[in-house]
Amino acid sequence: MLQISVWKRIAIWLTCAVGLLLAAPNGFYTVVESHNDAVKEIEVSGSTPELEAQRALWPDFLPNGLVNLGLDLRGGAHLLAEVRVQDVYAARLEALWPEVRDALRGLTPVRRQDAVAGELKVRLSDVDKMGEAMAIVRGLARPVQTLTGAGASDIEVAGDSGVITIVLSEAEKSATDERTMQQSLEIIRRRIDEVGTREPTIQRQGSDRILIQVPGIGSAAELKEIIGTTAQLTFNPVVRRSTDGAESAGIGNKIIPSLDQPGLFYVIESAPVVTGEELVDAQPSFDQNGGPAVSFRFNTSGARKFGDYTAENIGSPFAIVLDDEVVSAPTIQSHIPGGSGIITGSFTVEDSTRLAVLLRAGALPAKLDFLEERTIGPELGQDSIDAGKIATMVAFTAVLFFMWAAYGLFGIFANIALIINVGLMFGLLSLIGATLTLPGIAGIVLTVGMAVDANVLIFERIREELQTAKGPARAIALGYEKALSAILDANITTFITAVILFAMGSGPVRGFAITLGLGILTSVFTAIFVTRLMVVIWYERRRPKTIEL
């Protein structure tokens, strides 16, 4: 019948109260001012008297999550970057040189020879050992790892006149391109997440381009500063110090400047002992003199290589290199086990914190060329918000009027539930920290129209039951019971569609899917539970002999 237990009533009203409480901060934490017909949103971090008054109205101990505005509403930065995948080929061959040198050391002396980009040339001292040397180098090849398993060799080896030429195979280049793009996407995402922005759009475009859209960033230049710094950390053996930055470093070496000592240069071996890719943690800290520094820790592989190198080279200097600048070049005093250390230099606290963030996020495998950059101001977003408000209010008003005109008092109950429904939707958006975009507003407008469908089904079913001469209580109970299956069928299929859109889509499609899916959940709850509870409370108090519907 129409009986609802006390605990169910408490649960329904408590759910509504919690949802509306979660949604409430969105009306208190921003204030809008108009100046010369331009509308400007002032963020919470501001200090205007109007904003302080707004903040004072909302207690700090209550939930204060907000619905984030997307790039099309809030403004932000848009970048299109191209990844230099060719740089990774060169780095791969650079890392292969020590391995080739060590493998051939017992056969014949070798030296590296100048080569064009994308090649590694090794000259043998004993030309007669050419065939045997090539066999050894080919033995260094590894199968290319792809999604379908191991494939062809990763290198191709050729020899002529005592010179062995090594290049990456096409299969390895293709696999390297894929790994480089995936790594770049992940590192960019981690760097943006580290600085606290929310719901960025980071997606691959074509074979070597990445689209980056971040709402709330002040300018494209600020976004480039966050993601454009490579923060490549390496530990390289030092060959010698120099004051001439133009001198020849020699094959297999390179000359780079000191970070905090102008005019001083270091000739270092190009092949690093350990790289920043083997870091597992980096945190801002202070050195023994109280100056800002960055402490770091390697993974198991990096710790082993770092420990072995320091054990074998006590008394020799080694360089801590960050983005082709020597941060410091200490002399190894003793074996350093454990894989932990500290980077010191002329850092400020802000510098050490930022460096730790970049190192923790990882090094970009290749540099980025920014082909397109745009800064989207909040004025265009405000126009979209205003248009969305108008569309929502028009839809809201039309639905409210229709339900009142068609169903009278029961229509008013449905209208109250509709208002609660929208509040619950914003409460859920605030709870999960979702980003509201223009397609998301379209999803809300669509939900407003769809939210009353369940009530229409229920009320029409009650009308049918009233025509069979059943009493009001029995007609209401049967109306809710018999309409339930149709309501669930219709909304479950739509919810499945929203889930598929969210899983398969990206950007605007996902924004639409989020608001649509949450709207379905809240509209079913308000139709089945909230309106029914209001009808039951009304019937218990009035006990009408007949009802007009």
Image (cartoon, grey):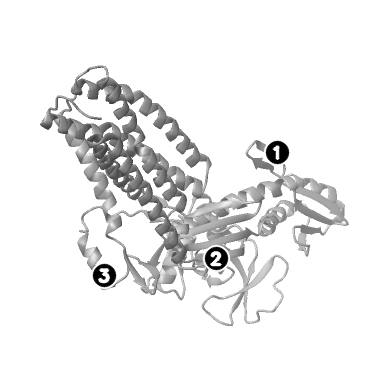
Q: Which residue is drawn at 62% across and 39% down?
A: 147
Q: Which residue is drawn at 70% across and 38% down?
A: 151
Sooner in the amino-acid sequence: mark 2 or mark 3: 3
* Tag in front: 2 or 3: 3
**In the rendered image, which residue does mark 3 sit on?**
50
* Tag in front: 1 or 2: 2
- The numbered mark at residue 374 is 2
**In the rendered image, which residue does mark 1 sit on?**
151
Q: Residue at x 41, y 58 (%)?
A: 385
Tell whether 38 sits left or right of 277.
left
Q: Which residue is drawn at 40% across and 27% down?
A: 489
Q: Do the residues labelled 1 and 3 touch (CB within 8 Å)?
A: no
Q: What residue type is labelled 1?
A: Gly
Q: Is residue 371 above or below residue 451?
A: below
Q: Are marks 2 and 3 in contact (CB under 8 Å)?
A: no
Q: Which of 508 and 288 is in front in this view?
A: 508
- Disc 1 and disc 3: Cα gap in Å? 65 Å
- Disc 2 and disc 3: Cα gap in Å? 31 Å
- Disc 1 and disc 2: Cα gap in Å? 42 Å
Tell whether 139 sits left or right of 405.
right
